[in-house]
Image: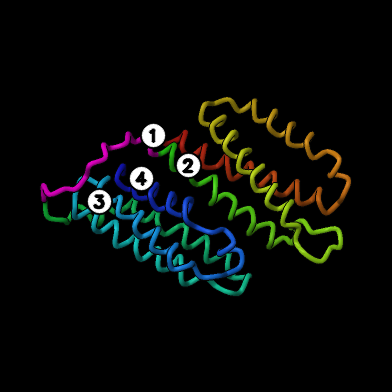
Amino acid sequence: MNQALIFLNLFFAGRLFFYDINQVMAGKKAELKTFWFRVLFGLLLFFCVASFLQAFLFFIFYFLLQLADSLLIPKQEKYRAWWYGLLISLPFLTLVFPSVVFSNLPKTNFSLALIPQIPFNISLVLLGFILIIKEGTIVIRLALTSLKTVPVTENQTSPDAEEYERGKWIGILERIFVYFLVIFNQIGAIAIIIALKSLARFNELNKKSFAEYFLIGSLLSLLVATLPAVIVRLLL
């Protein structure tokens, strides 16, 4: 289980550091250099996983996921959310590797592991934290796009890129605070975060289109932060 968490942390950290959100939203293939940066990042598996054979199998799976993630993005918007959901689900198959795959591997003492094993609790909390940042942003943006509540400019003809970017960073900070408040069982303090966010956007809520964007985005952001935090608390 702990080695599977290492894999998941590395996989999603690679997306966090090197993955372009606009790639998913526009249905574009990843740049070649981005693909290779992520592949090289995956080599850390050999230095984190105790067994060389297990690290090798993890890396093969990691590499195949990178190929799918970089090259097979649907161009049609209606299929993009389904593809993203499938792709993000596949890495979690590694949670069944220990009982299904690794149990039949020959025993070997050969190892390249140099990095000390991270405790299970820390790995689990770290994984949830990584997921709520970029993956949370992608989920919310896909939902806002599907519901056609993306903020637009004054002429109502094109997306308001400045507002969209500002909303992204506000959402990320909100999710980080909410995630750790749930982890530390300080749920009541979430009301302060919501109140501050609403107060900062109070004047803009007079516009119906912005109010819908704000409400849907805020509720999704809370859900995206709370769900992983609750799962982490249950597993700790």
Residue 216: x and y, percent?
Answer: 72, 49
- Residue that carries the numbered disc 2 in the rendered image: 128
Question: Which segment did they paint magenta?
Answer: 108-123
The label number, if any, that marks residue 5 in the structure image:
4
The label number, if any, that marks residue 122 in the structure image:
1
Secondary structure state at the residue bearing disc 2: helix
Crowd rating for badge 1 (residues with CA inside 10 Å; few <14, some 14–19, many 20+):
few
N-terminal of the pair, mark 3 or mark 2, is 3
Q: CA distance from mark 1 to mark 3?
A: 20 Å
Secondary structure state at the residue bearing disc 1: helix
Q: Are marks 3 and 4 in contact (CB under 8 Å)?
A: no
Secondary structure state at the residue bearing disc 4: helix
N-terminal of the pair, mark 2 or mark 1, is 1
Q: Are marks 1 and 3 in contact (CB under 8 Å)?
A: no
Q: Is residue 75 above or below residue 220?
A: below
Query: As shown in the figure, which amino acid type bears the numbered disc 4?
Result: Leu
Crowd rating for badge 3 (residues with CA inside 10 Å; few <14, some 14–19, many 20+):
many
